[in-house]
Image (cartoon, grey):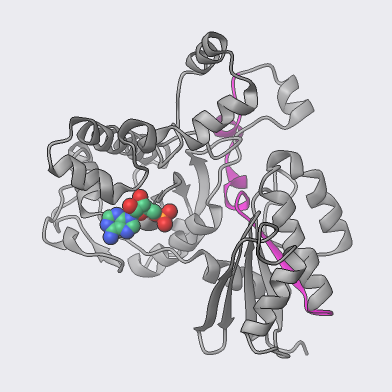
Amino acid sequence: MKKAIDKVLVINSGSSSLKYQLFSMKKGERLAKGLVERIGCGGPKDHTEALKQVVAELGNPKDIDAIGHRVLHGAEVFKDSVKVTKKVMAECKKLVKFGPLHMPPNLGGIEACEKIFKGVPNVAVFDTAFHQTMPDCAAMYAIDPKYYKKMGIRKYGFHGTSHKFIVQEAAKFLKKPLAKLNVVTCHMGNGSSFAAVKNGECVDTTMGLTPLAGLIMGTRCGDIDTAAVLSIMDAEKKTPAEMDTILNKKSGLLALTGSSDCRDIVSKAEKGDKMAELALEMLAYRMALYIGAYNTVIGGADAIIMTGGIGENSTEVRERIVNRLGALGIKLDKKANKIRGQVAVISTKASKIPVVIIPTNEELMIARDTVRVLGE
Ligand code: AMP
């Protein structure tokens, strides 16, 4: 008989930082949490050194049963989380082209764990996997199919671990079997994406080939006419790399208001700043637009679920979104909407579709998937 998995270490390894959390799955508790920064730029020289620091911070534990890793992109190869083997690592390395900034440190974190935690199984949990159930009509772009065949150009979607977590939690909260659950999940943070979930599976999502598509975000523009991008590149003689930086790092709320943080923008708007007011209305408008569209896509939602830094905390942004959902028979409960950071229904009892806040927990989802994959 297999030994039950208890201690699970969750690693989110980025280009210059490594975040970790340690869970006891038996106790259902988080035992430790931390962050190693400045990897390769003043701090530890690489991810192996960073991991040694984590081991020291955890007091040299000898009882870690498994390690779960956040990996950005699984493309069409990985439709679920997977136990890491030599073959899996070789496949992952072929996917670096889909995430040249994130994939190398994600995979570097796995390799560091293989060296330091010898014999402990590693599981890769992909940000894209939850969205792999999307039908072609949602995932394909209307361009020559040779670009899909040659380069894999299609919609993949991201934040899958967060969407999956809140779908599972929503099923519990609404007391509905996951296989019959229809919800629109709204992950609203510095990066934002929504998913249309029918019978517990993703059928559409707002991000695309990369996280640039869809909603207006802290520093990303979201949906834009691609001809506008070409016009700017042509007029200002921008290279693809420069334009990538403009659209991903210098657009969105930052470009409109000078700040990417919703709290700043709400306070500016309250003081009468017209651009801050416009930015909030643009943000809420596009979010409501996708909620309406996805409600149609799934044939009517059992609930709209909000999460992420903004979804869990911003009374003001939630109010602006929900006030645009009247046509779906949804009305805001202003008093309930004051809630922050906890599970709550913020729509009135008479609303046709409840709007529910569910705090996300991507690390716990990674730990749960690690246990599930290793138990199979
Ligand atoms: P995340 O990327 O999920 O950490 O979310 C970051 C976003 O959440 C930022 O735009 C913050 O302004 C917003 N946020 C975090 N806490 C609050 C809060 N208490 N009230 C309003 N917005 C918040």
Tell me: 269 left or right of 222.
Answer: left
At horizontal 56% and vertical 42% (from top left) the residue drawn is: 157
Number of residue marks: 0
Quarter of the image with the C terminus in it: bottom right
Reply above or below: 213 against 353. above
Q: Is 136 in the magenta?
A: yes
Tell me: 274 left or right of 132.
Answer: left
Write down the region rendered in magenta.
Answer: 117-142
Quarter of the image with the N terminus in it: bottom right
Q: Where is residue 29 in the image (x, y as percent from the top left)?
A: 49, 84
In depth, the one of 28 and 313 nearer the eye is 313
In depth, the one of 31 and 42 nearer the eye is 42
Q: Where is residue 122 in the image (x, y as percent from the top left)?
A: 75, 70
- Does the rendering let one see residue 3? yes
At horizontal 75% and vertical 63% (from top left) the residue drawn is: 46
Reply above or below: 39 against 289. below
Reply above or below: 312 against 138. below
Q: Where is residue 272 in the image (x, y as percent from the top left)?
A: 12, 37
Q: Is 113 in the magenta?
A: no
At horizontal 35% and vertical 63% (from top left) the residue drawn is: 358
Q: On the image, which quarter does residue 124 sit in? A: bottom right
Ligand 1 shown in quarter: bottom left
Tell me: 193 left or right of 53.
Answer: left
Q: On the image, which quarter does residue 308 sit in? A: bottom left
Q: Position of residue 340 (x, y in %)?
A: 26, 64
- Does the rendering let one see residue 310? no
